[in-house]
Structures are given as C-alpha cells and as structure tokens.
Amino acid sequence: MTTNAINIVLVDDEALFRKGMAFILGREKNFNILFEAADGEMLQNALAETNVVPDIILMDLKMPKMNGVEATKFLHKEYPEIKVIALTSYTNKAFIINMVDVGASSYLVKNASPDEVVHTINEVATKGFYYNDEVMRVIHQNMLASDGKPQKSRLDSDLLTKREKEVLQLICEQKTTAEIGEQLFISPRTVEGHRNNLLLKTESKNTAGLVIFGIQNKLVDLQPNF
C-alpha cells in the first residue's frame, strides 16, 4: 500500500462478487481495500467502528436491510467526503438518475471490464466524479424530459462571475484541477476557490452536483461523444 493509497470499501450482498472485486482491485498498487459489507446496515456499523474513513465506496443497489440508494443518502448526510460509485447489474435509466440524484459520483454496470472499474475509481479519486458517455447521455435525456419535474430555479444572470462560468464549463468537461488551472492560467488553489464558490452559490453538495446543475440550467456547452 502506498502513502497516497485510495481507501476503498465494497458493499454488495453477493459474497463471491465482493471477493472477486477485492482480488482484482487489491492488485492495484494505489488501492487499499478497507473492508467489505453485505448491505447498507452492515456498512453503517462498520463505518462507526473504523478508524479510517474510506475515500470511495463501490455500492450495489439491490441489497437486504438497506439498499444502495438509502445507503448513499445516509453517506451524503453523515460522511459527505466519501465518494460513492454505483456498481450494479441495473442499466435502467431510472436507476441511473436515482443514484445520480442522491449523490453517486459515478455509475458502473457489473459487466464493465476490470480496467474500466480501475479507471473510474482513479477518476473519481482525482476529480470527485466520473460519468461515462452512457451516463452523460441519460442525464441529458432526463433534463430534456423533466419539464414537469421540480428543478432548482434558474440562475440570476449576475450570480456567477465570468471566471466561475469558465471553471464550471471545464468541470463539466471532467477536467482535473490541474488541467483547469493550466487552461485558464490560474493556480490549482485558485481553481479550488472557484469550485467552492460554485458549490455555495448553486447549493450543490459535490462536484457531481455541479455537473447536474450546469446541464439543468443550460450554463454549459457540452459536446458528448454519443
């Protein structure tokens, strides 16, 4: 385990799947598997007893006692610094949108390749979120079809500065803090300052929320590859 290891927890009611994922991920030098849990309730108990809070939790959706959606809601409230990656067999758009809405930083299906899972974990650890083209497509479609759904009010034209809008655009393009700083010729610390201001102004809980907000309020111009 390296000093900059990403601490990971696996939450799934299928023991064989958990053990397989633990074996695959455990081979990565920068990954550290803290523990496993069979459902959200077991996760709650384990988090209350651990001395090391995980960076990322790979979360199944359908589990006994407490499912993945409820567990993610709990984490958002009690452990907002933990990033949740949904890892499930469900590909239905409603499941994707539901998990995104409650704060999942990424969404993967269980037929994803090991390389894709590793890549997603690293992206989430670096950027705070990662949505592949399929998930971004679903988010776009949902926003277009949500005319009857309550949404956050449209932004006042003066709420965000020009620079904040530029940073938001690059966040939605899934650029890292370093990449944003290099493109805008500002320091990483300044980028983080703008990110924090965006979170406060848009009342978003995390970086993934900023992406949803930007798309929802038509503040960003994205050209997704789908």
Image: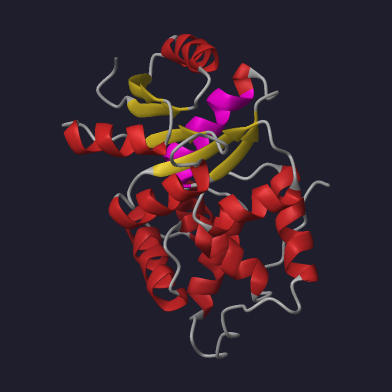
> Of all residues shown, which one is farthest toward the front?
65
Image quarter of the N terminus:
top left
- The picture places residue 70, in percent across and down from the top left corner, at 46, 49
Q: Which residues make up the magenta segment?
A: 116-128
Residue 121 magenta-highlighted: yes
- The picture places residue 152, in percent across and down from the top left corner, at 56, 79
- The picture places residue 127, in percent across and down from the top left corner, at 47, 45
In-front residue for pair 17/187: 17
Residue 41 position by quadrant: top left
Residue drawn at point x = 49 percent, y = 27 percent: 12
Where is 50 relative to 144, above or below?
above
- The picture places residue 8, in percent across and down from the top left corner, at 38, 28
In-front residue for pair 218/151: 151
Where is 211 relative to 111, above or below?
below
Residue 6 magenta-highlighted: no
Q: Is residue 55 visible?
A: no
Q: Is residue 6 visible?
A: yes
Q: How many marks?
A: 0
Where is 148 relative to 168, above or below?
below
Residue drawn at point x = 44 percent, y = 40 percent: 126
Q: What colour scheme does the image use?
A: secondary structure
- Name the main secondary structure of what is drawn in magenta: helix
In-front residue for pair 185/216: 216
> Of all residues shown, which one is farthest toward the right?
226
Residue drawn at point x = 60 percent, y = 69 percent: 214
Residue drawn at point x = 35 percent, y = 20 percent: 33
Using residue 165 as the reference point, say whether residue 42 is left or right of it.
Answer: left
